[in-house]
Amino acid sequence: MTKTENIQNSFEESISVEKPFMVFRIPGRGVELADFNGQTLFLLKPWKGEIFSFESSSSGEKPSLPQETSKADYAKSFKKYKEAFLSGGLQKAILSSVIREDKPQNFDPIGFFFRLCETYPSAFTYLLYHPKRGTWCGATPEVLLEGKREQFATVALAGTQSVVPSQNYEWGEKEKEEQELVSQHVRAILENVGVKELKESEPYTIQAADVVHLKTDFRFKHNGKVESLLNQLHPTPAVAGLPVSRAIELIDSIEKHDRSLYTGYFGILTENETHVFVNLRCMQIGNQELALYVGGGITERSEMEAEWEETRLKAKTLLNLLKS
């Protein structure tokens, strides 16, 4: 039996008996099938709520897909976001939306996962099933925390453009401002928790699938508990906004769908290494349809049409593979 056949059989069996399943690929490594009884701790944190267990348990009620976000509904939410900036104090807030797609005929989740791995080698790619959360698949570019022993790294990520052949990218003041806000937030957290030997890169452009972003790297030493540091770093401004607490209040009051695992985090912890990623560029797999989750940062300078188009652009990470 090949490795692919073994993964396929494990996936099908897990769903039939409602037992958690996860196959993943960390950038630079091979495909790995999660062993929930081994020495590796698997973390799965939804947008809201506590980290939950991969212990085998039946869900009772089956998870369902959220409703699609219409452009009219998005425009109404965008208007409320802009009004929130008038009161002052809010610098940025993430507005997310849902795109529903018919599941392609003979859609194969395992095959799609391997296509994601091949197409996006620099992303953390995964396929997971959990009785209480359903089946999810994605390719995310955003590291929340990586490291070996006491040497760690995290990033600040913001701004989005389409990939162009010339690879000459000009960033506007809105994107530069948004990136600096995120960097300031990460910098403050790391300084407050007392990390040592903090080193910060200059912002630079990286490609993530069909788009590019501005990125700043942070490297440091930390000898405290990893879980505590994760709680400080999440939710990031890239998935919530700034100030984080006010942005979350705005999101909770306006967004109509449950983000569920979107903009949460997941990853692995062992005695010697940490690999934890923010769950972006993802979709939930239903019986007949797929739900893609996308979002973007809204600031005082944002324009509705541009932000709407940015979410469509981000969705192409998955849509292009579904339709190819």
Image (cartoon, grey):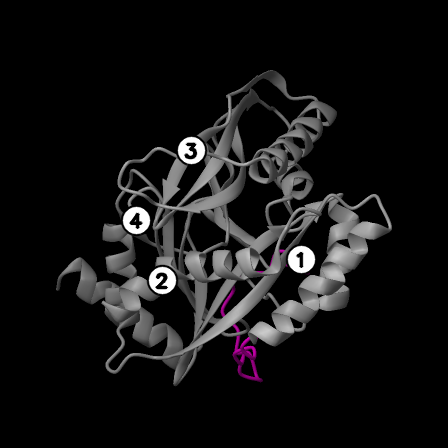
Q: Nearer the viewer, mark 1 or mark 3?
A: 3
Q: Which mark is residue 258?
A: none
Circle 2: element type? helix
**Is residue 49 found inside the magenta-colored segment of the image?**
yes
Q: Outermost residue, left direction?
A: 1
Find disc 4 in the rendering and name its residue: 120
The CA span between labels 2 and 4 is 10 Å
Residue plotted at (64% across, 21% down) = 195
Q: What amino acid is labelled 1 in the image?
A: Glu
Q: What amino acid is labelled 3 in the image?
A: Thr
Residue 54 shows up from this direction: no
Give the mark nearer the N terminus: 3 vs 4: 4
Q: Nearer the viewer, residue 208 or 121?
A: 208
> In the rendered view, would you say 148 is above or below 144?
above
Find disc 1 in the rendering and name its residue: 50
Q: Which residues are magenta?
A: 47-69
Determine the image quadrant of residue 14: bottom left
Q: Position of residue 186 (x, y in %)?
A: 64, 32
In which quadrant is the C terminus drawn? bottom left
Find disc 3 in the rendering and name its residue: 205
Give the mark nearer the N terminus: 1 vs 2: 1
Q: Residues within 10 Å of mark 1 (few under 14, many from 20)?
A: few
